């Protein structure tokens, strides 16, 4: 009896730690997805394809803040970057894709446990959130409404299971979406996050000097900077070592993206 109890408890604990897409896509979720899909289908949507680069500046009232955001698309982990942010006590917003989480589950838990980092949604399979529009950056698009819902909601649930907090922002892969995605996101009570400044680290040949100049160019209160944390071979840390002191000298501080909704 005691052995059976231990086995049952072990099974429950293991199940509670199952972050796989199959485990998350249970009967409750399938019914939920059907309900959201019906709501989207009943809407009249022109379905324009657009770059999701809306600024959050207008939501903030206290001057002098910049939000550094880092996408984790797939693959690697720039530990040096995270260590630098921690050593400098710089809050940052991390957009994690489901693909990246599945390959870096313990790191995802570690990042979620640190209050310095706000964890947000970068899509379950890192796909452009659109059923219209052209291909961008070699990335696949979602092919139907079901995939759009999964791209947002299943990754919401994966992140919530890891962090204990449901994401409030979603940044689609490539920062491109269409109005079906936008409407779906609204029904899922999540806001599509944009940016004001591209550091340029999407491209391997961008130097630290170029990145820092891109960050500092037209620096303003409410600016959202987009960088990446899954390319340890690139120059993000060196760029930030140049840009951070320069921005601080100009009087800027750093905050989470969600702080712009509260300041």
Image (tube, rainbow, N blue to C red):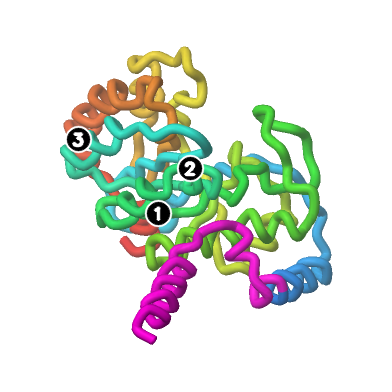
Graded by Cα atoms within 10 Å as few (under 14), some (14 to 19) or many (20 or more), the crowding at tag 2 reads: some
Q: Which mark sits nearer the N-terminus, 3 or 1?
A: 1
From the image, which quarter does the C terminus lie in? bottom left
In the rendered view, tell whether residue 166 sits above or below residue 27: above
Element type where label 2 sits in the image: helix
Q: Which residue is mark 1?
A: 119
Asked if marks 2 and 1 touch (Cβ < 8 Å), the reply is no
| Depth check, front residue: 164 or 16 | 16
Q: N-terminal of the two: label 2 or label 1?
A: 2
Q: Could you tell me which quadrant the N terminus lies in?
A: bottom left
Above or below residue 185? Residue 16 is: below
Say what secondary structure mark 1 lies in.
strand
Q: Position of residue 229 (x, y in %)?
A: 40, 35
- The total number of labels drawn is 3
Name the residue: 28% across, 21% down: 238
Q: Which mark is residue 103?
A: 2
Question: Which residue is identified by label 3?
Answer: 248
Magenta stretch: give its range: 1-30
Q: CA distance from mark 3 to mark 1?
A: 24 Å
């Amino acid at each position: 009896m005691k052995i059976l109890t231990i086995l049952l408890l072990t099974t429950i604990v293991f199940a509670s730690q199952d972050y796989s897409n199959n485990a998350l896509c249970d009967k409750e979720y399938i019914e939920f997805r059907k309900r959201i899909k019906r709501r989207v289908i009943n809407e009249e949507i022109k379905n324009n394809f657009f770059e999701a680069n809306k600024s959050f500046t207008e939501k903030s009232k206290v001057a002098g803040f910049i939000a550094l955001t880092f996408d984790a698309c797939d693959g690697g982990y720039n530990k040096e970057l995270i260590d630098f942010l921690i050593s400098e006590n710089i809050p940052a917003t991390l957009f994690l894709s489901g693909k990246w989480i599945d390959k870096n589950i313990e790191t995802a838990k570690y990042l979620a446990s640190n209050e310095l980092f706000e964890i947000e949604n970068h899509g379950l399979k890192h796909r452009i959130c659109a059923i219209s529009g052209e291909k961008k950056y070699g990335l696949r698009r979602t092919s139907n409404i079901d995939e759009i819902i999964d791209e947002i909601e299943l990754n919401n649930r994966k992140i919530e299971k890891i962090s204990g907090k449901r994401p409030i922002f979603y940044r689609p892969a490539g920062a491109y979406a269409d109005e079906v995605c936008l409407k779906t996101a609204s029904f899922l009570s999540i806001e599509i996050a944009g940016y004001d400044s591209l550091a340029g680290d999407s491209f391997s040949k961008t130097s630290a000097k170029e990145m820092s100049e891109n960050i500092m160019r037209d620096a303003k209160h409410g600016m959202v900077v987009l960088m990446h944390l899954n390319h340890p071979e690139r120059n993000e840390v060196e760029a930030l070592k140049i840009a951070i002191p320069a921005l601080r000298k100009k009087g800027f501080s750093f905050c989470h993206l969600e702080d712009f909704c509260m300041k």
